[in-house]
Amino acid sequence: MRDSERDLLATVVQQRDASEAPSEVVFVLTITEGPERGRTFRLDETTPTRTLIGTSPACEIRLTDREVSRRHAGLERVGSALKVSDLSSTNGTWVDRVKVFEAELQGGEFLRVGSTMFQVDVEHAGREAQLPSVVAFGRVVGASREMRRLYPLVARLAQTSVPVVIEGETGTGKEALAESIHEMGPRANGPFVVFDCTAVPPSLVEAELFGHERGAFTGALQGRKGVFEQAHGGTLLIDEVGDLDLSLQPKLLRAIERFEVRRIGGDRWLRVDVRVLAATRRDLDREVQAGRFRDDLFHRLAVARIELPALRNRIGDVAVLAAHFWREMGGDPRALSTALLQRWEDYDWPGNVRELKNTIARQLALGDLADVRPERPASVRPPPLPVSSGGLGAAVGAGGDAIDAFVEMGLPFPQARDRILDEFEQRFVARVLAQHGGDVAKAAAASGIGRRYFQKLKARARK
C-alpha cells in the first residue's frame, strides 16, 4: 500500500470514528461463588483475542476450582456483546441455569463453570474508544475496528522474539501477518522459512523439521538441513501446527524450549537461533481439550496469541481490500464501480481475504463474465490451455480479443473462465518475475502475496 493511499485511508477512518463516536464498553466479571470468590476481571477494548477460563497455566482467568476443566470456556468480545463458548468441558458451561455451548452475553447474566459463579456486568466508560488510525501493518491491510485493535499488539510483538500463535479461518491472512511480523522486526535481514504441516507426508515430517544425515534412511543420498537450521538467524513459521502428529509434538517442544535439534541419523545436537511463529485454522483450545494437541506445547508456543477475524466480521474492509488489490493488480480505478463493490460487500466470503483476492483477479481477467462464487479447488480445475493450441497468449499475439477467442471455442462457461484465469496467473507470474530479475522474494512482495503462495502460482504456471 502506497504512503499516499495509507494517509487518505487513515483520514477517512478518523472521520468515520469521529462521526460514530463509539463509547467504550467494558465487561466486568466478578466471582460470587467458588474458591476465588471476590476476584474481578475486566475485558475492555484492548483485549484483542479470546480470553480463556480454566485451570491451565495458559488461561488468562485461571481458577483452582477442581470442577473446572483445564480449558473450560472461552470469552470473546463481539461488538457490544461478550461471546462465551464451552470448550468441551467436563461439567459444562451454564448461563442463568441454562447449559450452553455458545451464547452472547449483554450484561446482567450469571455465568457458571464448575462450582464457580461469575456475575457479568457492563460498564459504559462514557468516552470514545481510542483506536489507532493506522490502516495496515506490513503486508496486512484493513481499516476496520476489528483489525485496528490488533495493530498495536502485533507492532509490539514484532520487536520481540517471543513465540506467537496466529489463529484464524482459512484465507484470513495468517501467513501474510507472520511475514509482516518478521519483516518489521529485528530479524528482518534473516531468513523467513515456512513449514506447512499439511503439505508433507507424515513419514517425512521429522526429517523436514530437523534434517537428516546421509544414509539415515532409504533415499537419503546426502545430508540435508531441516527447517530449524534453514531459519537460523531468522524466523520459522510452522503453518497448520494443529495438524502436527501427536507423536512429533514432544520433539518440537524440545526444539523450541532448548533451541537445539538433532538430525535423523545424527549423533550431536545443533544449536539454532530461531524465532518461532505458529499458525492454525483449528481451534487449539478444543484440540488440547480433546487430547489431540499437547497442553505443554501449546503453552510454550502461545506466549502471545493473535486471532485474525473472518472477513465477514471486518466491517468496511471488503471495499478497502478490493480497492487495494485492484490497484495492485494494475486495474483501472475508474472501472471499479460502486455497484461491483456493493455486490462484494453483500457476499459473506467463506474463503476470506484469499477468496476476495482471487475474485478480483478473475474480475480483471474476465470482466462481465466474472462472478463472486468461490473458485473450484485446484485439484478439479482443468489444466491450463497451452499457448500453442490457441490460448490467451496466442489470441493476444494475433491481435484478437482474448475473451472472444475462448467464447468462440464453444467451451462450457466454467472451463472458459478457468482457462482464462490460468493464463492470467501464468502471465502475471512471468511478468513480475521478469521485472525483479527472477527474485521470488521481491516478486512476491511486489505482488502483495506471501512467498509460499507465489511459489504455488509459479509452480502451477509451469504445469
Image (tube, grey):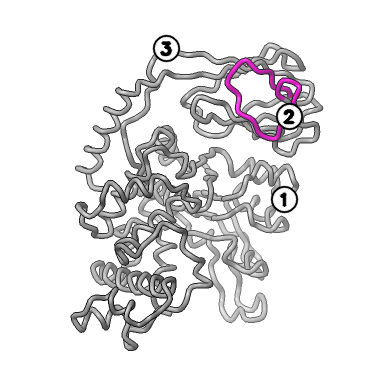
Q: Is residue 103 magenta?
A: yes
Q: Magenta segment range? A: 95-112
Dot 3 amino acid type:
Gly
Residue position for label 2:
93
Identify the residue at horizontal 81%, vertical 27% (top origin). 66
Label 2 secondary element: strand
Identify the residue at horizontal 40%, vertical 61% (top origin). 451
Whole-angstrom CA distance, mark 1 to mark 3, is 45 Å
Residue 463 sits above or below residue 269 on the image:
below
Identify the residue at horizontal 26%, vertical 52% (top origin). 336
Residue 126 got which mark? 3
Taking the image as drawn, is residue 125 in sight? yes
Mark 1, other Cα within 10 Å: few <14 / some 14–19 / many ≥20: some
Dot 2 amino acid type:
Thr
Frontmost residue, 446 versus 399: 399
Q: Is residue 43 magenta?
A: no
Q: Quadrant of residue 72?
A: top right
Residue 292 got which mark? 1
Q: Position of residue 103 (x, y in %)?
A: 64, 30
User: In terms of sequence position, does the residue under pointer 1 or pointer 3 come before the other?
Assistant: 3
User: In terms of sequence position, does the residue under pointer 2 or pointer 1 come before the other?
Assistant: 2
Q: Position of residue 228 (x, y in %)?
A: 54, 59
Residue 375 sits above or below residue 13 on the image:
below
Label 3 secondary element: strand
Q: Which residue extends farthest bottom?
A: 388
